[in-house]
Amino acid sequence: MDDRLPFVNASRRRVAAAEALAARLPALVLAAQRLAASAAPGRHGRRRPGAGEQFWQYRDVRDGDAPRSIDWRRSARGERLYVREREWESVETLVIDIQDHPGMGFSSQRGGETKRDRAMLLGLALAALALDGGERVALFGRTPACVGPGALDRLAAGFLLPAAATPPPGRLAMIGDFLDPADALAADLARHGAAARGGTLLHLLDPAECEFPYRGRVLFEVATGDPPEDIARAEDVAAAYRARIAAQRALVVGAAEAARLVPVFHRTDASPGPALAALRAALEPVA
């Protein structure tokens, strides 16, 4: 027997998975652009005062405004004093990271949307919104910061690359199922420099992972390749499972908040629009 066979098979599986992903990317990019266009406003819907060059609006002078901030030409046309405000412009990079492990390929519905596909859809839609607002976007450890025409396609192609590059600084958006133990989750957040970056974390689960709807004898296969587990009466372990998944959700929330990431929860059977809006709101600068 050839000892290399398991490694050869694993390599073939990785190639096949990459080819399948490459075939899906154009449709995912198109779906992400449509989601970004319909689920949240573009750049002009997020305008706010701040450091920048573009004029935004005039407002009445307030206590504490420096005399040099007053627009005397506009004020001379009436009896009130006005301040000329500029539009806030992002100077940071949005760094998106999507968990990449076998469990992300799970879907409880045959042929249904996997956690990985929903995560990529939300990640690309979030990138499309940021790019539309003139921001730079990178995939953590996979691509440099991208901006301008063609940037979304370059980011999508980055999903085919191994995680190796040094990530740029910037606010972080992490998307995954985060079913790891507490110490592994804390180590992952530390590796991402989450506390220094700030940002958001989306905890993404399949509905079956939330509800455990199984009854009778069920053979549970493990994505890690470990032997499957044969449960004679799935309903007998349902309550313990639901308590455990609730504890995991609380753990993820606590770990995210401790790392200065705003936690967001989402299920793959829910509309992606509200989740995208929640992610974008969590990344907005404080006015």
Image: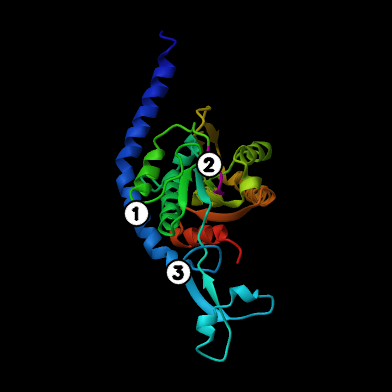
Disc 2 designates what residue? 168
Q: Give the Cα separation between the discs numbered 1 and 2.
A: 27 Å
In the image, is 51 to the left or to the right of 244? left
Q: Is residue 213 visible?
A: no
Mark 3 is surrounded, within 10 Å at the Cα level, by few (under 14), some (14 to 19) or many (20 or more) other residues, namely few
Find numbered disc 1 in the image and state the secondary structure of the residue it sits on: helix
Q: Are marks 1 and 3 in contact (CB under 8 Å)?
A: no
How far apart marks 1 and 3 lie (CA) works out to: 21 Å
Callout 1 crowding tier (Cα within 10 Å): few <14, some 14–19, many ≥20:
some
Q: Amino acid at mark 1?
A: Ala
Which amino acid type corresponds to the residue marked 2 in the rendered image? Pro
Name the spot of residue 89 as percent of width and height, x first.
50, 60
N-term-proximal mark, 1 vs 3: 1
Residue named by callout 3: 45
Give the labeled residue for mark 1.
Answer: 31
Q: Label 2, label 3: how many angstroms apart (C-alpha)? A: 27 Å
Q: Which one is in front in this view, the residue at disc 1 or the one at disc 3? A: 3
